[in-house]
Amino acid sequence: MRAELNIFHSCEYETALLAGLEQGHVPEELSRHAASCQACADTAAVWNYLHSFVQDPAETEQLPAAGLIWWRAQLAERRKLASRSVASIQIVQNAAIALAAILAIALLAAYSQTFTSIPALLLEGIAAFLFFSVPVAGLLYFWARSER
Amino acid sequence: MINAGTQAELATSETRPMDEESFYLLYHRTAASLRRYLRRMLHDPSLADDLLQESYLRFLGAKLSPDMCEDHQKNYLFRIATNLVRDQASKRQALPLTAEASSTERLAQRVDQQEDLRRAMDKLKPRERQILWLAYVEQFDHNEIAAIVGARAQSIRPMLWRARANLADVLRSLGFREARR
């Protein structure tokens, strides 16, 4: 019996007393001993007190339905997946906005100086696009793999 | 022990989450005892039911391996529930023990006394309540209790002894007369 291992034994009869309580029958000799032993009296009182709740009719009230909990768990899981998808879309959106802003600034800068720097501007645009899109694509790829 | 086993079992957790049938079996095996535990710690049946559901939701959300043994599943559930109780305790103070007897009505006085007795455990520290229940009712061993309440296994033995002595004192002061089965 596992209960035997649990309690801080300050009396050699406590193990036997606990076993008796668990089995629902405490031998007369042990009962007499418990009446004169503080440790055993405490053990018996605490054990009986705690187990009075176990036998309480109020405890037999209907439990929440397991099906409902399972359904809520599935719903929570779907919500979590949905929020992750939304987060990834958000990342792409932010990256696109940032890229567009950089390109717009570069274009404005180029046109404000001279029309002759168009090829350089094109290279800068491509470089900026690669600079932002490759890490984003990498992030999305690893995220998608971790989801599987 | 809960930790080593649980960690090993968690290793396979990502691939095969618990199926519905396994969950029902686990629920029917553990829900009644977990609710009793929550009710004794909280004294609020509806809150206990809420935390019961939350415990299972978190358990399922943890995506543990279905290969996890029954004892570890139960330990893990009690650990989640204990953490939830701890969170609740930090949000609201435990209800005080009503020590004042009502004036004349005997019936009311008797109800008060019974209520006092029911709330005798409130006189103890939350952790003492937890370890007493886990040891005497759920019969977890010291290592399991330590993992559930977040304490060192070596400290459980003296804590349990102190908690038992404290509760026995409270029970005596309230006139609890044990009825041996």
Image (cartoon, coloured by chain):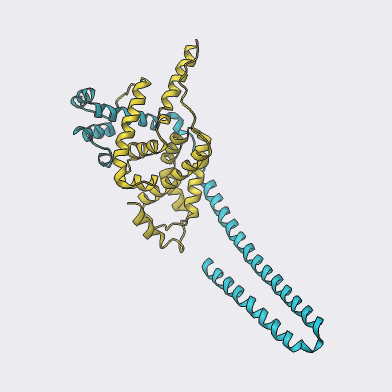
Task: Find the residue positioned furthest to the front.
Answer: A113
Would you place residue B75 above or below residue A9 in this image?
Answer: below
Observer able to see residue B40:
yes
Q: Residue at x 27, y 38 (%)?
A: A7
Q: Is B48 on the left or on the right of B177, as rendered?
A: right
Residue B13 found in image quarter: bottom left
Front position in the image: B49 or B26: B49
Residue A99 image offset from top left, x and y in percent: 70, 74
Front position in the image: A24 or B8: B8
Q: Is A63 on the left or on the right of A54, as rendered?
A: right
> What color is chain B drawn in?
yellow
Task: Find the residue positioned furthest to the top.
Answer: B104
Residue A11 found in image quarter: top left
Would you place residue A147 above or below residue A110 in this image?
Answer: above
Q: Residue at x 33, y 21 (%)?
A: B177
Residue A143 image offset from top left, x and y in percent: 55, 68
Front position in the image: A43 or A115: A115
- In the image, the chain rendered in cyan is A
Residue A130 image offset from top left, x and y in percent: 64, 80
Would you place residue A27 above or below residue B101 in this image?
Answer: below
Observer able to see residue A48:
no
Residue A86 image offset from top left, x and y in percent: 64, 62
Q: Residue at x 50, y 12 (%)?
A: B103
Q: Is A146 on the left or on the right of A52, as rendered?
A: right
Image quarter (top left, top right, bottom left or bottom right) of the N terminus of chain A: top left
